[in-house]
Amino acid sequence: AIAVLEQGAEPRQALRYQLERGFEQKSKIDVGFTLTAVVMTLALGDPNYEVTFHLTQRVEKVGRDGALRVAVSVDDATMHPDVLAGGKRAEQFQEALSAVKKSTGRYTMHPNGHVQDVELDMAAKKASIRAHDMLDNLGWALVQMTPVFPEEPLGQGAKWTVNRSVRQGGILVNQLTTLELMERDGSEVVVKTNARQTAEKQDFVAPGKVEEMSIVTMNGIGTGTLTWELTQLAPRAAEIEANELKGVRHQVGPTGEKRETQSAVGATRTLSITAD
């Protein structure tokens, strides 16, 4: 659901993404993940890393309603050389990056910017939890970097909210985002975002895992600034930081002796795209 709070100053115009079948774009996206807090014991991925994804996005199909079916491929995935400078952890990261490289997927992008049906397939047949986390964070980035616009014409200073469900780390999350149109020059816009997330109690399976866990509570906040040319598939520049804290119920202990416990997990995700 989209609700306009303020339409902004004149002149105003309806903002829509305008792309044709066959349009292709290459982009570089830095996606970071930091584990900020863990209370109790829970097996998780690495606590701190940033991956640079080199992507190719291509419009495969344009529906009658203007919805785009977009193919995405990971041409390369890299990390800072210091992280890969030797040792067991560096080897594990190298293996994860190798598994992520050449991964492919698709998603649907509507003319107003609503992104859904994100499907990313790991290139490697066998991949570590690290690799699955990396690909899941890329899916998070594809959704969060694309602002959704209302039907109403907007001018500078316009504010609106978008209330939707997103899949994140295997969890169905309710996200309420407040957006503000900071600048507009033709089809180029600068949008400021402020998001809040919650999740209902639910069972879920984290990326790359098989055991089921349960969400007890979840709260998250995120802020960002996005510079978009609405004839493109990725922003020209972007900075987003999102923090979450969730309570997770899960099983611990050896097979046959498992007991239920609860963990509190805090995490930060970041997205950065630097204008050329």
Image: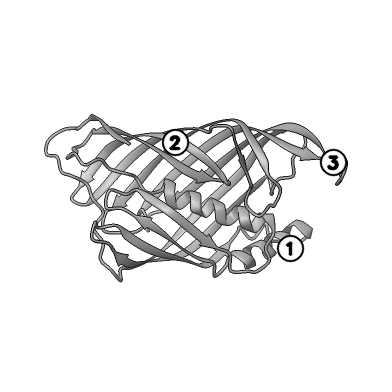
Residue matched to label 3: 253
Q: Is residue 273 visible?
A: no
**Amino acid type of the residue that numbered disc 3 sits on in the rendered structure:** Gly
Q: Could you tell me how far apart the alpha carbons at marks 2 and 1 are, in whole angstroms?
A: 36 Å
Q: Secondary structure at mark 2?
A: strand
Q: Secondary structure at mark 3?
A: loop
Badge 1 crowding class, 10 Å Cα cut-off, few under 14, some 14 to 19, many 20 or more, is some
Badge 3 crowding class, 10 Å Cα cut-off, few under 14, some 14 to 19, many 20 or more, is few
Toward which corner of the image does residue 161 lie, by quadrant? Answer: top left
Instruction: Point out residue 127 in the picture as x, y percentages from the top left corner.
Output: 67, 63
Mark 3 or 1, which is nearer the eye? 3
Q: Secondary structure at mark 1?
A: helix
- Colour logic: one colour
Residue reaching furthest to the left: 11
**Amino acid type of the residue that numbered disc 2 sits on in the rendered structure:** Gln
Q: Is residue 1 visible?
A: yes
User: Which numbered disc flags the more N-terminal residue, 2 or 1?
Assistant: 1
- The C terminus: image quadrant: bottom left
In the picture shown, does residue 83 fall above or below 167?
below
User: Which numbered disc flags the more N-terminal residue, 2 or 3?
Assistant: 2
Toward which corner of the image does residue 212 lie, by quadrant? Answer: top right
Q: Residue at x 59, y 46 (%)?
A: 33
Residue matched to label 1: 91
Closer-to-camera residue (210/226): 210
Q: Could you tell me how far apart the alpha carbons at marks 2 and 3 are, in whole angstroms?
A: 34 Å
Q: Could you tell me how far apart the alpha carbons at marks 3 and 1 are, in whole angstroms?
A: 28 Å
Instruction: Point out residue 273 in the picture as x, y percentages from the top left corner.
Output: 43, 52
Residue matched to label 2: 175
Q: Is residue 244 left or right of residue 195?
A: right
Instruction: Point out residue 270 in the picture as x, y percentages from the top left corner.
Output: 52, 44
Residue reaching furthest to the front: 256
Q: Is residue 144 left or right of residue 16?
A: right
